[in-house]
Amino acid sequence: MEERVQEEVPAAQRTGGHHPVREGEVFNMRYQALCKLGCGAFATVWLCQDTRRKKHVAVKVLKSREGFAEAAQDEVALLRCVSSMTKKDRAGENIVCLLDDFRMIGENGFHACLVFEALGPSLRCLMGNYAPQGLPLPFVKKALQQVLAGLHFLHQRCRIIHADIKPENVLLYGRDKSLQRLLPDTLDCGQRTDLRLKGPGGDLGNQLEESDLMSIEVKIADLGSACWTYKPFSKEIQTQPYRALEVLLGLDYGTPADIWSTGCLAFEMATGERLFDPQPGKYFSRDDDHVARIIELLGRIPPQIAFSWNKSTKFFSRPGALLRISRLCPRSLHSLLADGHRWANHRVIPFAAFLLPALQYAPHRRATAAQCLQHAWLAAPCQ
């Protein structure tokens, strides 16, 4: 499992925080810690040996504060639903599998722990090897098909909104052990945060042979922000560059928010550049810039959407006018791909046709995961 990377705080500041795991430590009389895979704001993730089943697993150890225990209970309930439905629908195999959960006591209090199948590094790691031009389109299509199949399963079978689709939450694995051959450090306790894929020459940073790349599969991971479609847990969801317009505006959201994020993910995989990368300015916030960038690319937000929120003046002074940003530089998705990324027209048109339905302003008009999966661009051979 991949987590947002940050340094752990000193032990003296950990009260109610991370459990200071030590290599060799055994959790729940079963899982022996081998090395740390990642450290985030909410948990650390450790590669462990399951001494009963004699295989590697990833153990997510949440912080000890009460709120994290409650969040873990929600995540476990969601993951158990996924596991139950996976027995009836193999599409659930596109979601990371929860194997076990338990609580343990440490020097900072009680910690909820979740045990997952051990997978490879995240899609972000793979994308790092192909910057700045983006991943090869055959792999982009394959990965998107698996992500969308996983989202369709979550949305329709489980009634779950993932709420944080991004490259860090899509993990790589290989059915035929190819990923383990290409990533010898994955189970060798190398730092996951610094991992780079090894190419045919064995040097770090090389790109992969097409056959090796196409042997890699992906799974959606980290349901720590997820919620039921009928019971949202929070108004604030999604990582900023992948945040849907309705979430930015503080409106009600549903499964279409995941599709917006997937559109952003698709663009970033294919081009090596974020579709929206908002930054704060002297007189405006990061959210202000984000809304402005969306308007520049996709056009004026209809008043019935912009002003359907009783606090709409946070962004707008009147229909079509932003409150704190007056000068916009409109650009179409076509020109962004053709001029900004030098894509040929025969590549631009079908890809833009795939992306735009996923970025519809009105959530009820946005393409569903099933509709995205049926789009001609995904099935067409790359030219």
Image (cartoon, rainbow, N blue to C red):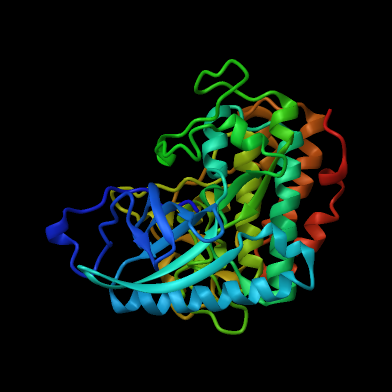
Percent across and percent down for residue 37 are 42, 47
Q: Residue at x 15, y 60 (%)?
A: 13
* Relative depth, front residue between 378 and 360: 378
Location of residue 54 (image quadrant): bottom right
Q: State whether residue 131 appears in this view.
A: no
As rendered, which of 41 and 254 lies closer to the eye? Answer: 41
Q: Is residue 84 above or below residue 139?
A: below
In this view, the residue farthest toward the top is 201
Q: Is residue 138 left or right of residue 49?
A: right
- Residue 57 position, x and y percent, is 51, 55
Q: Residue 19: in sight, yes or no?
A: yes
Q: Is 95 located above or below residue 330 in the figure?
A: below
Please state, as top left, top right, bottom left or bottom right, where the C terminus lies in the image. top right
Q: Would residue 85 appear left or right of 232 to someone viewing this image?
A: right
In the image, farthest residue toward the bottom: 230
The residue under the point 56% across, 59% down is: 53
Horizontal placement of 156 versus 117: left or right? Answer: right
Residue 197 lies, in percent from the top left, at 54, 30
Quadrant in the picture for residue 347 = top right
For the residue pair 220 and 365, the one nearer the viewer reads as 220
Residue most extreme to the left: 12
Residue drawn 16% across the image and 57% down it: 11
Q: Is residue 300 above or below residue 134?
A: below
Q: How many marks?
A: 0
Image spot of residue 162 (x, y percent): 58, 66
